[in-house]
Amino acid sequence: MTASDRAQSGERLASDEPADESRLEELRANLDVVSARIERGCADAGRDPGEVTLVVVTKYFPASDVLLLHRLGVRHFGENRDQEAGEKFRAVRRALGEAGRDHLTLHFIGQLQSNKAGHVAGYADVVQSVDRPKIVSALDRGAHAADRRLRLLLQVSLDGDTARGGVLPEAADELADEVAAHELLTLKGVMAVAPLGADADAAFARLREVADRIRARHPGADWLSAGMSADLEAGLRHGATHLRVGTAILGSRPSLL
């Protein structure tokens, strides 16, 4: 569901425990603030908010928050830890399925290890962090084992430090061709994180150049995932179709014990 037409649903899941109404209202208020930011950012950039998808990043937060967000109309969720995401979203999908509610789309946005990629392919709908051929091969094997299609984005390194994830811009074309060669993998576009302390506008301008080049070779690869809680407006200025927002909606992440 796009940011501009987020449903204002108040229905409960039949399988839910009694909802935490104060948490529901907190999430609703935060979603309204983020949606208003998206509306303003699109207006400033001369864009249609209907072409922007909000992916709410729920890492470290419980399945109960995912279900509350689903009640509020959110349909795209992001996770970056395999050991957490698989179990959490299996539980979420069971609850939604029992209630006969709409499905959701799960975006895996974290750095992938090849030995985990096959497992991720079994439950994620979109993988936004593809950065090397070894990951492509592992995802392809996982997709075949699960008999399901996967949509992939190339994660592009904007600071040249591939140790933190991301393919170098000059190597992105070859990696895009590698993804496109696999029957069950669909290349959808590119993703990047603005380097810490860097100018987000300059970073996303570089990403847009890579995105345009990839789309010229693969016309269906028209997604550009750029912009998080602190810099979503910069992402919108440079053509982001997908925003990955966590803290601005869910609050500070709980400490890990």
Image (cartoon, grey):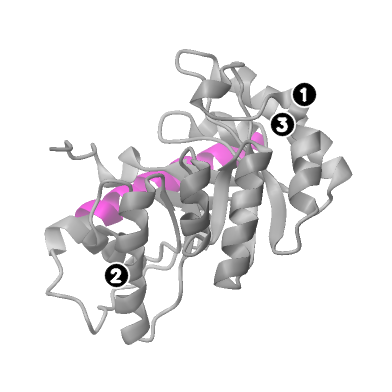
Main secondary structure type of the part rendered in magenta: helix
Position of 8 with respect to 117 (left or right) is left
Rendered location of residue 242, percent (x, y): 57, 47
For the residues bearing labels 1 and 3, Cβ distance under 8 angstroms: no
For label 3, the residue is: 208
Rendered location of residue 123, percent (x, y): 46, 64
Give the Cα distance between marks 2 and 3: 37 Å
- Label 2 or label 3, whichever lies nearer to me, is 2
Give the Cα distance between marks 1 and 2: 40 Å
- Amino acid type of disc 1? Glu
Q: Quadrant of residue 28?
A: bottom left
Total marks in image: 3
Looking at the image, tell me whether mark 2 or mark 3 is earlier in sequence order.
2
Give the Cα distance between marks 1 and 3: 13 Å
Which region of the structure is painted magenta? 26-46
Rendered location of residue 216, percent (x, y): 87, 42
Decide: few, some or many residues near mark 2? Use Cα within 10 Å; few <14, some 14-19, many ≥20.
Answer: some
- Amino acid type of disc 3? Arg
For label 2, the residue is: 91
Residue located 38% across and 86% down the image: 100
Looking at the image, tell me whether mark 1 or mark 2 is earlier in sequence order.
2
Q: Nearer the viewer, residue 178 or 68?
A: 178
Which label number is shown at residue 170? 1
Decide: few, some or many residues near mark 3? Use Cα within 10 Å; few <14, some 14-19, many ≥20.
Answer: many
Q: Quadrant of residue 74?
A: bottom left
